[in-house]
Amino acid sequence: MGSFRNLKAIRDGERGVTLVELIVVIGILLVLVGIAVPDSQSEDLAGAEARRLMSDGMRARSVARSQWTPCGVRVHVPTRRWRVQRDDGTPILGPDSDSDGWRTLAPGVRFVKITRRDPYFVFLPNGRTYRDAAIIISDDVTSWEVSSNALSGQINSWPTELP
């Protein structure tokens, strides 16, 4: 009896969604998501700056290990700048740095110093650090903490709340 109802519905012009219609709708949704996702990601300026700082931290650690000399990332909170430098203060130039090795945060992004944590990331020749270091990078939308671990020498970043 149920199959007769289906035949009657088809005869009366009622039908379900075809596979082609479903594929077209899914395609339109994918295009809209593809447009929206990069746009929302570009608003995370603090996250982008945290990745830049973390990349420089990894570069400082690599220089310390390959040249067997302490090397670090000096963060200057008031001027919103940082640079990779040897322990004696000699700058190591990198991408987007000025002639003294300083890189500046994007407009609207700032450093927030964490109490009792030094914002100077120093890496020893064995790849470790002699103390923990951390700094928060924040804009109007998000905040990210960039931190190094003294025991492992690892430098990481993650989203965080302002203290």
Image: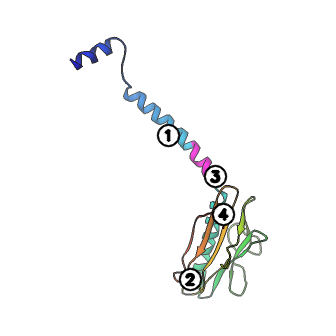
| Disc 3/disc 2 C-alpha distance (Å) | 32 Å
Q: Element type at marker 1? A: helix
Residue at the (59%, 87%) spot, across then down: 130
Marks 3 & 2, CB-CB < 8 Å contact: no
| Disc 2/disc 1 C-alpha distance (Å) | 44 Å
Residue at the (68%, 62%) spot, across then down: 138
Q: Is residue 33 above or below residue 6?
A: below
Q: Nearer the viewer, mark 4 or mark 2?
A: 2
* Residue at image mark 2: 150
Q: Which residues are magenta?
A: 35-41
Residue at the (62%, 47%) spot, across then down: 39
Q: Element type at marker 3? A: loop
Picture coordinates of residue 121, whole percent (x, y): 64, 79
Answer few, some or many: residues within 10 Å of disc 1's Cα (few below 14, many 20 plus, some between 14 and 19): few
| Disc 4/disc 2 C-alpha distance (Å) | 22 Å
Q: Is residue 131 above or below residue 139?
A: below
Q: Amino acid at mark 3?
A: Ser
40 inside magenta stretch: yes
* Residue at image mark 1: 30
Q: Amino acid at mark 2?
A: Ala
Q: Which mark is residue 42?
A: 3
| Disc 4/disc 3 C-alpha distance (Å) | 12 Å
Q: Which mark is residue 106?
A: none
Q: Is residue 40 above or below residue 9?
A: below
